[in-house]
Structures are given as structure tokens and as C-alpha cells.
Amino acid sequence: MSLIILIGALDQGLIFAVLSLGLFVAFRILDLPDLTVDGSFVTGLALCGMACLSGHYLIGLLLAFIGGGIAGVFTGILHTKLKIQAILAGILTMTALYSINLKIMKLKPSIIFYDKDTIFSFIEGKFMLAGLDISKTVLLAFIVIVITALLLYFLKTQLGLSLRATGDNEVMVRSSSINTDFTKILGFAICNALVGLSGGIYIEYTKQASYTVGVGMLVLSLASIIIGEAIFPHKSMLKHLVAVVIGSIIYRFFITFAFQLGLPSSDLKLFSALIVIIAISIPVFKTNYRKMRKKYARN
Amino acid sequence: MLEIRNLNVIFNQGEIEEKEAIKDLNLKVETGDFITIIGSNGAGKSTLFNAISGNIELTSGQILLEGKDITYMKDYKRSKVIGRLYQDPYSGTAPSMTIAENLGLSFSRGKKQGLQLAISKDDKKFFQEKLKKLNNGLDERMNTKVKLLSGGQRQSLTLLMSTIVTPKVLLLDEHTAALDPKTSIEIMNLTKEIIEENKITTLMITHNIEDALNYGNKTIVMNKGQIILILDEKQKAEMTIEDILKLYNQHLITVSDVNVLKE
């Protein structure tokens, strides 16, 4: 495999790390799997893409962040105020977003802007490795580090602490005079704001995308989180966040290897689902294996 | 300071399983009172607590705290001033957060949840001093996740958490019932110490008649959603466990209930 493909995989891993950090907030901290992400990723992508078309690549990222966040607030309200189950609330928002995203894209199925500037335009050619331009990778790594640091800081603030406790023991949080409806909505908002941002970065990187690219984003980010946790120790919050980022990159490498070995791109989703199933079942197999060894050691 | 007026709580009203949990209950709690509450299962003790802390909807009646009507105040808003401990030691703490983080969370109770770091260095020192008083080594384990603690350690931590910002009213719902006898005594002593030190107005439900008579300045006996007897400090001193059991029998509490009480 050539270096250029590896760098491409690393770049994608970093872009989707932002997505996975977002889902981490809903899935691991609040313990609520949020299906909104399949839709909010495209919302961010569409908002940012349209902004880029008119030359506003930075405002585009901001819009992507805010747009995703609003989608999250909507899911949060469905879940907390209307008492709709988290998964269903996410599916409802995601379905609604399908139409909204098309509207944002002015009813065109894809966005293409090869001739426009992006956040990557100005750094191109600044960092070289073995004759290859790795400037995009450097910028992406910087973005991921900043987001991880900000998220880590947030999770250690008073607000962050009440968010974490909400997923941990809701009764206790309410009896600490914290409105858990608010913390849940906030969690959904942060999750989808990061997911939207990830969508924005994605389109600035690829400069083209179709409105169906969001399908499977939840599975992809779940895979990243679970792979990260399976491979990397995650005792402290910092290590847990780093594990998510690393998991996201490793997942991308898996996919890239699979393509290199001849996996048809139509099988990508099947392969992704398989990886999640395997990653989730690793701890189960580990326990069973330990039990078996004990059993045979006794005999 | 805490006043309950004509409280009625009926579950499943209008249905076949309709149950009158609390019937025309009136109660006045004075500042500094430490009231113990006894009564058989289903007497309405926990329902009374749920009504005070806002976890259930009242059928009718009024609850006043320091003269202010809190009948329709949301539960999480009441918890600014009303602390509550449950029987289950796992219910009062966030298991995957550290001891310091748990304390940090309850220390910010009633304040606006902002974006400043939850635990400052001063906070940490303050927490450590408070933990030291628990005398069970938790002050050395501030960064340990709470899920690694024993039931007794957790309950002592919960007690500290719910009193670290002094509440106006503390509700103890059989908070030592799930602990072993030795730990139970330790937690009970600790409770008394904290309540006296901070002069916290307290209501305590217990199934242990001895505890009910030994602690506090008043004892309330409940049956079928009503208060059937209020004992003041002097009467408490004269009462024996046998007297209470006799009283239970007078009120036709079933034998099985009495056995539960004897345990």
C-alpha cells in the first residue's frame, strides 16, 4: 500500500474522529444512542458546502456546528419533553433532516466546488513528507487536538460534571437540583454540533459530496468508539477521548485495507456493521475464554 | 418551618386499584426538629417523603417551606434546599465519577452551573477535610471512582454530599437499612453528628423502633396514610419498644407487619 493511501486514510480517520467525539457525548456520557447523527452530519455538510460555494469557508464551519447543534436540540426536546424514546427521537429528526438537507442544498442531490477556497487552501504545500504534501493532515490533527482539549475541559466544568452524572445516575442528579431535561438536551446539542462540524470539515476536504453520504454515520462512529475502547485503556476521561480518536483512525485503516484487498465499495456498509459486531463481542469472548481456561485448569 | 396541610395522595384514582396512600395529613415541623417516623409497610411514610421532595403529584393539599408554598415546585428545584437519602446506597452517587467529582457536583447545588472548572484546589482541600471526618479513609481516595466503594462507604459519602451545602430539610428514608449492623451504627452516629453540627431540620423514616426512640426530639407513628401518634421528647423517653408494638396491635396492624417491625 502506498504512503499516499495511508495518509488519505489518516485524514479521513481524523475527520471522522470529530464525528465520533460527538457521538461519544451522547452514547457514552449520556448513555443515549443518538441516530440523529446520520442526518446532522449531512446538515453540517450541506450548510458548510453552500457557504463555501459563496466563498465563506470559515463561516461555513460555524454554520455546520450550529446547524448540527440545533438538530440535536430538536432530538433532545422530542426525547425529554415529549417523552419519545431516544432512538426513535433520533430517527424522527434524522428523517425530517433528509428533506431539510435537500432544501439547504437547493434541491440538488450533491454539492461540488473544486474551484473554491477551503480552510485547506492556504496551508497546502507547507508541510512535506517524503515528497508528499501532508499539510492537510497537519491541519486536521491540529483541529482534532483542539476539539479534544476543549471537550475534555468542558467535561470537567460544573456543567460538564452534571452532564456526566446525568448518564450515570439521573435520580441523584435531580436531587442535586440539576434539571436533567436541560443536561440531556445540552448533550444531544453538543453531540450533533460536533457531528455537523465533522460534516463541514468533510466537505471542505473532499470538495464534493452527495446528500446520501450520511447513511451509516452512526455505525461508523460507534465502531470508532468501541474499537478505541477495545484496544486502548480508557480509565481517565482524557484517555477515553484519545481512545475514541485512535479508534476512529484505526477503523479507517481497516476500511482502507479491506478496499486494498479487493472489497467492492458496495460492501462497505456490510463490512462496517461486521466490524461493530466483532468489536462489541470482543469483551464477551474474552470473558468466556477466561472462564474456559479456569475450567480446564481445574480438570 | 415545614408545614403540610390537608395532604391527600390517592394513587390510580378512579380505577379498580385505587389506593389512598395519604389521608388528610397535617404536620408542622419546627426549625431544628429531628423527627423519626415509624409505621408498618404501606403506612405512607415514603409517600410523605415523595410529596415533600416533589417526586409525586398530590391529589390535594399544600406544602409550605418557611411560609412559602412549594406545592407546585419542580423536584429538582426543591432539591436546592431539601436533601434526601434513600435506603439503596447506590442511588445517591454517580458510580463512574470519582469521589471528588461527586462532591463537586453536590457542592455546586443551587448555584448556576457554569463553565468554570468544577473542582478548584480550595474545593479539593475542603472536601478532604470533610471526608476526613467520616473516618473511613475516603479522604485518601479522592480520585477513586465511586463504583469501587462499599455500600457503607457510599452511604457515608451520600450523607456528606447531601449536607455539604446545608439543606433546610433533610429526609432520611431508611438510609441505614441496607447496611450491616456495625456499619449501620456507624452511619447512624455520623448522621447524628452532622445533623447536630449543622442544626439541620430532619425527618427520618426507620423500621428500627429502638432507633426511632433513641434519636431525635419527636417521633411520629403512621398507619394507613395517617399520623396516629406524635411523641415529644419526654414521652419518647418513657416509651418502650413493647409500648409501641402494643400500639400497633391496637390499630389492627397485621401480625406479619409486627414481625417485620421486630426484626
Image (cartoon, rainbow, N blue to C red):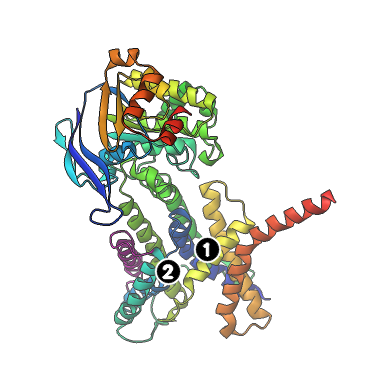
User: Is any part of residue A125 visible from this angle?
Assistant: no
Image: A168 above or below A96: above
To the question of a shared chain for discs 1 and 2, the answer is: yes
Q: Residue at x 48, y 72 (%)?
A: A217
In the image, the segment drawn in magenta is: A56-85
Which image quadrant: the N terminus of chain A?
A: bottom right
| Amino acid residing under circle 2 | Leu
Q: Between residues A46 and A289, which one lies in front from this camera angle?
A: A289
Q: Residues within 10 Å of mark 1 (few under 14, many from 20)?
A: some
Instruction: Decide if residue B36 is on the left or right side of residue B178.
Output: left
Indicate which label's residue lies in the foreground, 1 or 2: 2
Q: x, y (%) of residue B206?
A: 39, 29
Label 2: which residue? A35
On whether residue A67 falls in the magenta region, the answer is yes
User: Is any part of residue B5 visible from this angle?
Assistant: yes
Q: x, y (%) of residue B48?
A: 28, 38
Image quadrant in which you'd find residue A45 = bottom left
Kindly identify which chain the residue marked by label 1 belongs to: A
Label 1: which residue? A138
Marks 1 and 2, the one that precedes in the sequence: 2
Q: Residue at x 43, y 75 (%)?
A: A203
Q: Between residues A87 and A29, which one lies in front from this camera angle?
A: A87
Q: Between residues B19 and A116, which one lies in front from this camera angle?
A: B19
| Amino acid residing under circle 1 | Val
Q: Which mark is residue B1?
A: none
Q: x, y (%) of residue B150?
A: 55, 35
Q: Residues within 10 Å of mark 2 (few under 14, many from 20)?
A: many
**Disc 1 and disc 2: Cα gap in Å?**
30 Å
On whether residue A68 falls in the magenta region, the answer is yes
Kindly identify which chain the residue marked by label 2 belongs to: A
Image quadrant in which you'd find residue A192 = bottom left
